């Protein structure tokens, strides 16, 4: 196991150097072989995702070579594979195609600018230790927007599979246009046969983890098209020869009116890519028993995207399909990715025409197969069974992406996530507590109808932080509990263990509540309040206002003190025992 021990030096930011210092010679054959196997898969996948994103295929290889090298230096995971990803295709396509107007050079600039925006956000967030932010998106919301993205990608690639092109704006209009084109007989039967056969082969071979199904299917399709010269005789669209040479440093200049959509798209990509990367990184770290810092993972992902943006690439992410290939091939460290990147570079320098007969329909099949794997149905069924409102929340996110488009849809998902978060804190659970016969502690009288209440004492539990959104509700529920007490109230004790924080608005409300209760002859007290929350009350000058005597370590201590001061008819069941 390799761990960074000195967090103050450059090892923290360059974990690849730490790996190199501790590299074992026995790992080298495994990494070299894994890198060569990986390269054979990275080439067709990179080209496929580039064309699906509205870019020339060569830029999928550019977006593979340099990011792999950057992540090998900055990334904390020893096995993760980064590159063009199906989850980002719809986002890139949604920004690049409408703004580029069919100009490939402008499309490349826009995609590169999005990669830089995404990379900068990830690096800054990692330095600021904000690696937790993607956890704010709940699982149903993630499922919703990812299912929407998967549907959008699938729809966008269907025309290429059938051998025709369409012009439309949005997934629903694309479906309508595809149906119309099929009914009009625009389908190229040979192209469809090649694409459908490639897709079937990929899906059938996917069950065998050690078999490179994508490579086998794409090579077979390319050989068939080249041997039968289907590109000439049957009008099957092919990739054509790739430019010879390596990616060069270039600043992606964009127009002023492109800035806002590029910023929105880059931010969306940062969220999606880091959410996927963090989950995959943690999964493989647990498998090989290493620890991965989520903040450094953000930095590594950001550095890879910056490298892609400045070297003629487009936004990239981790890959749940290529990482298992590297693992199955025996990869030990990121050197496998370095070997893979160098192998692709050699291909571009030595044999750029090797893939000129690669059919576009086969590339569409690769993307469609990846999009199918993005769909989540099984767990959504479980969510529907156990909590239907979260299922419908997921469906709302799915519909937002499918109807409004990827960028507005992801924006809707983020808004819904914030609303969901605030709603849980805005309307939290609360309870009036009583003493249930034979049960230790104090419990919700709604769940224990037979629980006895101490005359003149209200025990009230609030199961959430106190902040501006729920302060007024807390005030109302306290007064309701006082009004519904069967006896005249003398003490009101807040069982505050679940209260993990308090803000200025809530603190001012408590001061007002204390005055209101005091005017009614009721004393306000707190039990089990956490020390960090007490520290906030001291800063808000409330602790001194109440005095030390108003805070009790346990509910039992508060009850005992109340019974000392106020002689009421009360015999606890434990005392009877």
Image (cartoon, rainbow, N blue to C red):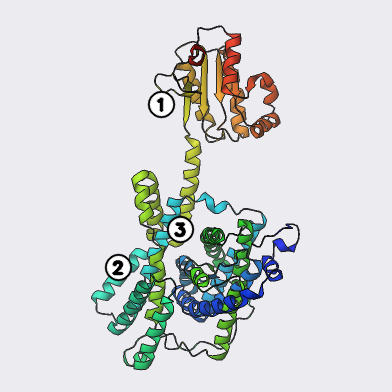
Q: 177 left or right of 87?
A: left
Residue 547 position within the rendered picture, expressed as x and y whole percent measured from the top left: 68, 20
Q: Is residue 165 visible?
A: no
Query: Residue 201, how many percent across, how many down?
Result: 35, 76
Which label sits in the foreground, 3 or 1? 1
Q: Is residue 447 left or right of residue 63?
A: left
Quarter holding residue 252: bottom right
Q: Nearer the viewer, residue 476 or 220?
A: 220
- Residue, disc 3: 408
Q: CA distance from mark 3 to mark 1?
A: 44 Å
The x, y position of residue 75, in whole percent, is 62, 65
Residue marked by disc 2: 176
Quarter of the image with the N terminus is bottom right
Tell me if label 3 and label 1 are in contact, CB under 8 Å: no
Of labels 2 and 1, earlier in sequence is: 2
Q: Which residue is tagged 1? A: 447
Does the rendering let one see residue 423? Answer: yes
Q: Quadrant of residue 397?
A: bottom left
């Amino acid at each position: 196991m390799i761990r960074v021990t000195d967090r103050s030096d450059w090892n923290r930011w360059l974990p690849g150097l730490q790996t190199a210092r501790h590299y074992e010679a026995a790992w080298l054959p495994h990494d070299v072989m894994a890198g060569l196997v990986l390269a054979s898969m990275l080439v067709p996948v990179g080209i496929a995702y580039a064309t699906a994103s509205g870019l020339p295929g060569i830029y999928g290889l550019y977006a593979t070579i340099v990011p792999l090298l950057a992540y090998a230096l900055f990334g904390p995971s020893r096995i993760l594979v980064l590159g063009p990803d199906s989850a980002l295709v719809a986002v890139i396509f949604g920004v690049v195609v409408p703004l580029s107007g069919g100009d490939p050079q402008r499309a490349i600039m826009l995609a590169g600018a999005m990669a830089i925006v995404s990379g900068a956000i990830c690096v800054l967030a990692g330095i600021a230790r904000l690696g937790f932010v993607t956890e704010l998106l709940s699982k149903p919301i993630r499922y919703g927007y990812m299912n929407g993205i998967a549907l959008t990608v699938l729809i966008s690639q269907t025309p290429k599979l059938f051998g025709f092109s369409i012009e439309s704006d949005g997934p629903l209009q694309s479906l309508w246009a595809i149906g119309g084109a099929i009914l009009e007989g625009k389908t190229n039967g040979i192209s469809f046969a090649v694409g459908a056969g490639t897709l079937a082969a990929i899906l059938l071979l996917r069950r065998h983890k050690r078999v490179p199904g994508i490579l086998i299917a794409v090579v077979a399709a390319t050989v068939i098209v080249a041997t039968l010269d289907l590109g000439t005789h049957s009008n099957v669209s092919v990739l054509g020869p790739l430019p010879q040479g390596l990616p060069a440093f270039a600043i992606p200049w964009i127009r002023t009116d492109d800035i806002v959509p590029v910023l929105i798209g880059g931010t969306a990509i940062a969220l999606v890519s880091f959410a996927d990367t963090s989950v995959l990184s943690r999964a493989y770290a647990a498998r090989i028993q290493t620890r991965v810092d989520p903040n450094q993972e953000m930095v590594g992902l950001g550095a890879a995207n910056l490298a892609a943006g400045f070297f003629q690439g487009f936004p990239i992410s981790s890959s749940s399909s290529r990482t298992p290939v590297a693992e199955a091939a025996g990869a030990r460290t990121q050197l496998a990715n370095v070997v893979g990147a160098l192998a692709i570079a050699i291909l571009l320098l030595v044999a750029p025409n090797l893939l000129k007969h690669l059919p576009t329909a086969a590339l569409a099949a690769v993307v469609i197969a990846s999009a199918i794997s993005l769909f989540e149905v099984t767990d959504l069924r479980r969510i529907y069974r156990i909590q239907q409102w979260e299922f419908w929340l997921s469906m709302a996110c799915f519909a937002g992406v499918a109807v409004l488009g990827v960028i507005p849809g992801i924006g809707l998902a983020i808004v819904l996530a914030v609303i969901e978060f605030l709603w849980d804190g805005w309307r939290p659970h609360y309870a009036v507590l009583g003493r249930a016969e034979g049960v230790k502690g104090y419990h919700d009288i709604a769940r224990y109808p037979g629980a006895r209440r101490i005359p003149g004492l209200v025990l009230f539990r609030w199961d959430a932080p106190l902040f501006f959104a729920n302060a007024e509700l807390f005030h109302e529920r306290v007064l309701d509990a006082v009004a519904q007490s069967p006896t005249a109230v003398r003490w009101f004790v807040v069982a505050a263990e679940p209260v993990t924080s308090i803000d200025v608005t809530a603190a001012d409300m408590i001061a007002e509540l204390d005055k209101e209760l005091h005017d009614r002859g009721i004393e306000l007290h707190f039990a089990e309040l956490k020390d960090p929350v007490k520290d906030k009350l001291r800063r808000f000058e409330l602790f001194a206002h109440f005095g030390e005597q108003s805070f009790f370590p346990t509910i039992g201590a508060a009850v005992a003190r109340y019974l000392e001061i106020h002689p009421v008819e009360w015999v606890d069941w434990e005392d009877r025992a």
